[in-house]
Image (spheres, grey):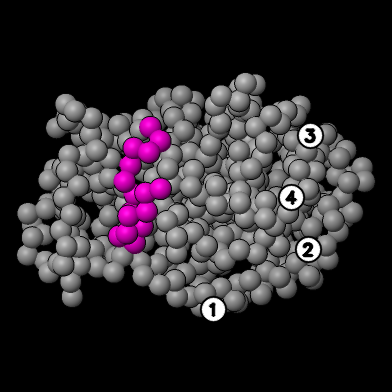
Amino acid sequence: MSGVLVRAQYLLSMDSPPVENGGLFFVDGQVLAAGRFNDLLDLPCDEQIDLGEGVLFPGLINLHCHLNLTGIPADRQKPPGFAAWARQMVDVIGEWSDTDAASAIQSGLRQLLRNSGCTTVLDHRPMGVNLHPRDGGASPLPRVLSSMEFGGVLAGVPTEYLFEECRSRCEAFPLDGGKGSLNPQSWLSPHAPYSVSPVLLQQLFTSRFSAAMPVRYSIHVSESADEQEYFSRSSGAMWEWLQGGAAISPVTPQAATPLGHLIACGLPPQQSLLVHANFLSERELSWVRERGCALVHCPRSHHFFGHGTNPVRTWEKLGIQWGIGTDSLATVCGAPADGSTQLELSLLEEARVLQRQVPSLSPSRILYRLTAGAAAAMGLRGNIGVLAGRAVADFNFMPFDAGFRPSPDRAAEDLAEVILAAAPGAFRTFIAGVEVTD
């Protein structure tokens, strides 16, 4: 057995305290040892790489993204409210071709790689955009876990058809991802409580599609005040839109809140990412924690819609699993009118917005939510987001500016702070041990 031994001034594994003169040993894209470089010198390696003065840390994980929306025009006007925005998106997406979607997906992946050293993306891909679920894995782009997204309410797509599409998707999912691959999972994304038939949700949540791997769900829930009003009062802008003729088979609320509606439909424990979750009550948050579900926060989307108090502070207080996503460029404030600055996908920019919204969150805590915490939320603890054990060798290296050195008594915070403040292109990024810096 032989492999590659990498050295850096600091190793931040997210599995233990920072290590000075750190080393990482991997074989065929999989980490076998991490720690002090001198302690790893006896391991059989074909190659040694000295990255120099800087910090080696895990690749970042994007828990929620709509890559096909990367090409949304920068001059698009922000609509007055969430329901109006949703109506606009239905019109925009309806005009896109497969070529448009493929180009947007590739562009989004390159932005995430260049701007934030993102190595794994959970992409919510509309049914019918038939690119391979790992189409980023074989090229110099982040890994892609593709979660098939569907609704059906607007177009009146039969429940039986959607259910069979989900079954086919899960049963056909490849188990062998090759060198440095992730543990196999199949992801489904029933879009939201207001856009998917309750009957279909009940069928999905009570079915076993494949005994070979877990099927996990990622669902938008309690994203907006319009959605809350749809379920609590059977009124409001979203109710008027969907019940007023836009939806061929509009959803009848099964409970007074979106999450209550999902629970009434049998939402399974420990199998779900609940995305946005801006308006969950403390009672509902306790349910999330007790059932082992995880939440996903998209800071720039939250700011775009003006959803009010950031919920992350409460999530942290209650000990809930959560991570960070970029959502899409359709939920980021538009570029300047002169077009001088083009907004792009960036997990680091999401992190910086979150820091401004919740200043009590330390840099190291935010970095954890972008790495090991995100992996745990996905059910991939120890497989990605860390540099230890038998994790995949997905990592970044950030060289230090001249004169920078972390304080010995707060090295983890200083290292996380400089990582989160990094400019686009600051990292060298490796996926399965192979450098993929764009």
| Of the two numbered discs 3 and 2 in the rendering, the one whose residue sits closer to the viewer | 3
Which is more N-terminal, label 2 or label 1?
2
Q: Position of residue 348 (x, y in %)?
A: 43, 36
Earlier in the chain: of badge 3 and badge 2, it is 3
Disc 1 marks which residue?
Answer: 211
Q: Give the magenta range.
A: 423-438
* Disc nearer the start of the sequence (1/3): 3
Q: Decide if residue 339 is on the left or right side of residue 389.
A: right
Q: Nearer the viewer, mark 1 or mark 3?
A: 3
Residue on which disc 4 sits:
96
Is the C-beta separation of discs 1 and 4 under 8 Å? Answer: no
Task: Read off the residue under disc 2.
Answer: 199
Closer to the N terminus: mark 1 or mark 4?
Answer: 4
In this orientation, which residue lies closer to the viewer: 170 or 232?
Answer: 170
| Residue 288 can be seen, yes or no | no
Q: Amino acid at mark 3?
A: Ala
Secondary structure of residue under mark 1: loop
Which of 245 and 337 lies nearest the eye of the viewer? 337
Q: Which residue is mark 3?
A: 84
